[in-house]
Amino acid sequence: MNGSAGDREVLIVTDPQLDFCPGGALAVPRGDEIVPVVNRLARRFTHVVVTQDWHPPGHASFASAHPGRAPFETIPLDYGEQTLWPEHCVQGTPGAEFHPGLDIPHAELVIRKGYHPGIDSYSAFRENDRRTPTGLAGYLRERGFERVTVCGLATDFCVFFSAIDAREAGFETAVDLAASRGIDLDGSLDRALAAMRTAGVELR
């Protein structure tokens, strides 16, 4: 770690978990490739936050919680449209653990998300109702951070929503694409990249 990123900057690593890597329940193609890249990137930052998807069994975002529905279908829930997923990152299961190659011992905070049974949470900053905060924005403001860099899994979901919410919260925001991988459901990756550019997120 050389602190080159500056003391008002923080790296947010989204969901570097086994279920999002090849062989996992909701594998992002080549998702494990980001691990050494993230490790190198994190050494440039004095301050690092890591998010962890942390669902209870039977979570509302699981297709298995909706009889007759299949993974990757979209259904309306109380807070809006929700993509249904295979069961993944269930609390206390091996798939919810961080990839064993992840090496960020200086990470200062782990934000768990998606733990409310009835609402999903992609963003590090707020849940999918777009109202309920995780508390991360307040934490970063109280500590005096001004700029965030987001990376991780997946580019078009948790990285995307985290970056958009970081901008809305008033932070200068960048996404490191080399340290991220996307799922790309029906063009979701291109849509996410375009929306981030429009929102003023620096893509690099």
Image (cartoon, rainbow, N blue to C red):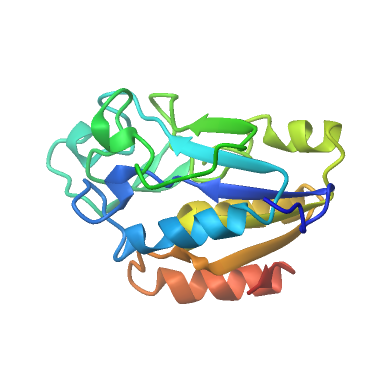
Q: Position of residue 118 (x, y in %)?
A: 40, 27
Give the vertical position of 203 relative to 169 (above or below): below
**Toward the viewer: 44 or 123?**
44
Q: Quadrant of residue 200?
A: bottom right
Q: Splitting the image into 4 quarters, where does residue 182 fall?
A: bottom left
Tell me if residue 124 comes above or below residue 178 in the rendering.
Answer: above
Query: Where residue 110 sits in the image (x, y, percent)?
Result: 56, 32
- Could you tell whether 82 is left or right of 46 in the image? left
The vertical placement of 129 against 83, above or below, is above
Q: How many marks?
A: 0
- Please identify the residue farthest to the left as the structure is shown: 68
Point out the residue furthest to the front here: 2
Q: Is residue 141 visible?
A: yes
Q: Quick one: quadrant of the C terminus?
A: bottom right
Q: Residue at x 62, y 40 (%)?
A: 49
In the displayed structure, does residue 172 sit left or right of residue 63? right
